[in-house]
Image: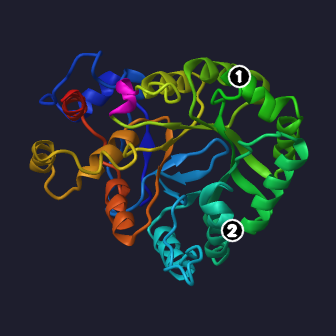
Amino acid sequence: MKQKENTINRREFLQRLGAGAAVVTAATSIPATARAAIAPQAAEDNAMTYREGPRGDRVSLLGYGCMRWPTLPAKDGGEPELDQETINHLIDYAIEHGVNYFDTAPAYQKGRSETATGIALKRHPRESFYVATKLSNSRPPFTKAAALEMYQASRRRLQVDYIDYYLLHNIGVPRDGETGPQRFDTRFVKNGVLDYLLKEREAGRIRNLGYSVHCDRETFDYVLSLHDKYHWDFVQIQMNYADWKQASRRDNNEAEYMYNELAKRNIPIVIMEPLLGGRLASLNDHLNEQLLAREPERSIASWAFRYCGTFPQILTVLSGMTYMEHLQDNLKSFCPLKPLTEEEIEMLNEIVAE
């Protein structure tokens, strides 16, 4: 029996939780529009949870971040080579256990991530996976020719005729005297690059076009305002239970604001940094003990993954799983997802405050 998913309102959600569920104030809980209700599985207890993508794709809620593939020891003082055999094994295991979304970029491991990912995925039927990569044209001059060569090189390295999810990478960080919106226009609009990518989407060589966000609110609002013109298929943001309200860097606006603005427009969201750069994989001893007392069979990291997965607008949650033990542990969080309750969300809010 395949996993069934739906989205319900707050009243229905709380009724399903039961009369004993704790209800916390709206100021500290997930908004009513941001609750997920995952129907229980009668069979396949270890089956992956999936979300529906913008074109009807059935996307695994756990996505594979391919930024840091394992390496072999360097030879003669050279640069370490990627461990292709281990990468193949990791991807084989992930696909076997339901993971079908793989995220890479030209900037990852100097382009070698795309190459290694392509080699590993090529061994599987094309319809069995979705591959995401990015236009990482972060260094001037921002010419159309350079951007298109980067795009074509990604397709060659990945060995694919089409890219399932293509992103404008790291939009709008203000630099060189430009504001975030000006930088976005310089990199993607004025040089004709975005017009070209839109035509590639029309031709089917890009199935979904979106962007990844490390920017201030001004830039986020500006690019999102272009949705009516460009029809973004998805957006990738940084989100975790610490950043929901507490993000402090100028290039990482509060996840709560970004999530709700995207949800209003029904734009699917891809999550990066669910562990806040690994900092939510293990807390201090007191807080670790608190979480382990509630779920002794789960890792500390699982709380962060389940937090993100609880939001229904989330398409997939990326994790950079360099080692098999990371992959196996993360699969437990999504096979299937056990959404957090209101009371558990409040507990995580208190942990963030502490």
Task: Name the residue located 90 percent from the left edge and 47 percent from the top edge.
Answer: 145
Q: Residue furthest front?
A: 77
Asked if the stretch drawn in magenta spans residue 178, the answer is no
Image side of residue 310 versus residue 155, left or right: left
The answer to whether residue 104 of the structure is visible from this angle is no
Q: Amino acid at mark 2?
A: Arg
* Residue bearing the label numbered 2: 126
Asked if the stretch drawn in magenta spans residue 244, the answer is yes
Task: Name the residue located 37 percent from the left edge and 46 percent from the top edge.
Answer: 275
In terms of image quadrants, where is residue 190?
top right
* Residue bearing the label numbered 1: 177
State the extent of the magenta-drawn residues as a range.
Answer: 242-247
Which residue is at the front of the view, 168 or 305?
168
Number of numbered tags placed on the structure image: 2
Which residue is at the front of the view, 241 or 125?
241
Check disc 2: other Cα within 10 Å, few if <14, some if 14-19, many if 20+: few
Image side of residue 154 versus residue 219, left or right: right
